[in-house]
Amino acid sequence: MVRTRNDRARLHTPVFFALLTGAALFAAIGLEGCTDGEGGGNNTNAGAPVTPAALAVTNTSLPDGVIGQTWSAQLYASSGSAPYQWQAGGMPAWMQLDAQSGLLWGSVPAAASGFETITATVTDSLGAQASRPLALLYTSGSAPQAPIILPGVASAQDGHFTTHVACVNCHTNSGAATAMRDSAGRDIAPVNQWRASMMANSFRDPYFRAVLASETHLHSGLASVIEDTCLTCHAPQAAYEAHLAGGVQTLNELYTATTSRAHIGRDGSSCTLCHQIEAANLGTPASFTAGYTINGGKQIFGPHSNPFATPMVNQTGYTPVAASHMQESALCGSCHTLHTTVLDLNSNPTGASFLEQAPYLEWRNSVYSTEVASPSAQAASCQSCHMPTDSQDGITINTRIARQPGGGDFPGISPRQPYGRHLLVGANTIMLSILRDNAADLNSSAGTAEFDMLIDRTRHMLQNQTATVQVQNLALAAGTLSFEVQVSNHAGHKFPTAYPSRRAWLRVLVKDGGGQLVWRSGDYDAAGRIVDGAGMPLALEAAGGPIEPHRQLITQQAQVQIYETVHADVSGNPTFSLLLANTHYKDNRVLPQGWSSSHPGVAAIAPVGVGGDGNFVGGADTVTYQVSGLAGAAYTVEVELVYQTISSREAAELFQYDFLREVNVFRQYYQAATRTPELIASTSAQTP
């Protein structure tokens, strides 16, 4: 079958936003009459003799090579007898070919110009051959487009919600107050810490808006519905009020309007959203996919009993109320258990839904769950890690939770605990740096120092609370170095978790007695792409490239253990589009400690593609390495577990659409950022 560019786009366009399921979406696009368009029909030539078609290369051209960017092209053949083998004559030095799959890929150098003629030759299993010359034209690509300048934060109230500006007077630090400080005197006020978080910047996030643009382009007939449902999570306050009024939330309004609705939308997942979620249905399926209930009485829920209500009532019109559910994981689970609607390859809804992310359900099936009858000594809620109640020195925080609007301490408020630092710390260092470095465009309410602090805390969590690696059974015999690498997961969920753009992998270097590199698996270049032994990006990094399988044994430098989730469409093919995701093609993310294959509901979150690997167990995975052809007597093995929030492969898939303004602008931000992976853990070992 020959696929057009649009067909390939359907298989490989990325999207990681929150498309909600439910009656509203299906009603909007209409389920009645949706078919695949492939009717049965009558074959009027049944029984007539047919002359077999000759083997042929069916490509007619190659996509343009954009100077300075990654490039890939899939070769296609028809007829003949599969499997095929491919050759490509006239390839420039920067280009590589996977002979089995027919994938061409590489990075176009700055010196490239004019055009090349590549002769593609296919050989089928019977030895028949066919060739076709294909032109490759070098271009400068899409010109950089002007950034989208987002309005800054303003004081506004609309319906149930207000922007965080209303909280600034009492919940920011002041030099005249002791409130909201740790034992070392550090500023830990909720507003100061929250406004650098991805929660605060959920709408301003340019990656979200880039993938939203690519998906509305791909499914253009559903664009308004997709926008509205995505903004339910990324501009939740505005979307909530729009839905109450019987309307929909649009992206354009949030880009340009100065209405109170637009202001609360641009404020992301703000104070008056989370602190007004009621306990009613939390932890149940009805609460998932933003199915929370907002309090109708302007009550602000918090963990402390007997709150001093008068200042908040006078300043904001909201009343503080004690509520224990603010410290429970089920609160987080209402948004971080997310089902999406499944579309077929013609953009029609199938009636099914897909579990896009489930860190809350993963946490339930771990030793950290607090929802079991007898919680373990390790039990901890989501808030315990992501909103820690101790200082960065490990000392329990005991402080006043607010100050007077004029700057001093409230005489009626005593120091309290627990006091959760509103870091909402995660793992997304690249996006925090992009928000910081492009402040003039994105207009986050956080300053450089606040972003730097959160990036520092993010790296601290990644390197101290996430995972460890260990080299085991290292031996050298008859020129073969063998060893095992064990990865242990210390997070309260799978690692990585949530958005499918995330991946972790093992970088393994073998050096001889003189410190010279002799073998490597999972090494990477300055662009964060995984490379082979010669330092060239692997085919899996190209848009449309192969998917690296889960590995039990690694013997070659082009093999690497990547912990990730890859989705499959309704045809079972890998897809990087969330809306086309029907099931998992691969999910070998490291399981949390205490994982049970008999846990209720485990089928929805079970690993995929790891069958037969007895070393892939709850809390750990062990990979065996065998490096042959060695002549030395002593070797050192260096191992790193590294992580990317946006994998290079996901970026390559997205940037096929950089003619779209949001994608084009994000690409500029991304290419100016540090793209090498974050270090999670490292170790080394030497031969005896």
Image: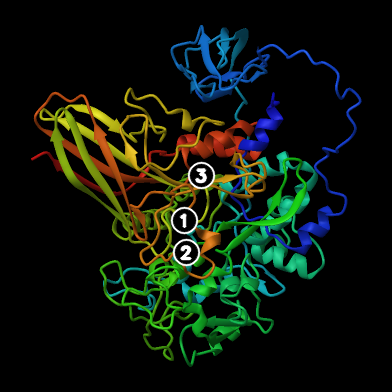
Q: Do the residues labelled 1 and 2 touch (CB within 8 Å)?
A: yes
Task: Report which quarter residue 215 is drawn in.
Answer: top right
Q: Which residue is drawn at 65% across and 82% down?
A: 298
Give the total number of marks visible in the rendering. Answer: 3
Residue annotated with mark 3 = 438
Q: Nearer the viewer, mark 2 or mark 3?
A: 2
Q: Which residue is drawn at 91% across and 25% down?
A: 44
Q: Where is residue 605 in the image (x, y as percent from the top left)?
A: 52, 59
User: Quick one: label 2 or label 3, which is nearer the N terminus?
Assistant: 2
Q: What element carries label 1?
A: loop
Q: Is mark 2 on a helix, strand or loop?
A: helix
Q: Is residue 556 left or right of residue 212?
A: left
Residue annotated with mark 2 = 362
Tell me the amino acid under the disc marked 1.
Answer: Thr
- Quadrant for the N terminus, please: top right
User: Quick one: label 3 or label 1, which is nearer the N terminus?
Assistant: 3
Task: Report which quarter residue 148 is drawn in.
Answer: top right
Q: Where is residue 241 in the image (x, y as percent from the top left)?
A: 73, 68
Residue 393, numbered circle? none
User: As drawn, which residue projects farthest toward the front?
Assistant: 47
Q: Do the residues labelled 2 and 3 touch (CB within 8 Å)?
A: no
Q: Name above or below for residue 516 compared with residue 113.
A: below
Residue annotated with mark 1 = 497
Tell me the amino acid under the disc marked 2.
Answer: Glu
Q: Name above or below for residue 18 compared with residue 642.
A: below
Q: What element carries label 3?
A: loop
Q: Which of marks 3 and 1 is in front?
A: 1
For the residues marked 2 and 3, what is the alpha-carbon distance in whole angstroms? 35 Å
Instruction: Classify 10 Å Cα crowding around label 2: few (below 14), some (14-19), many (20 and above).
Output: many
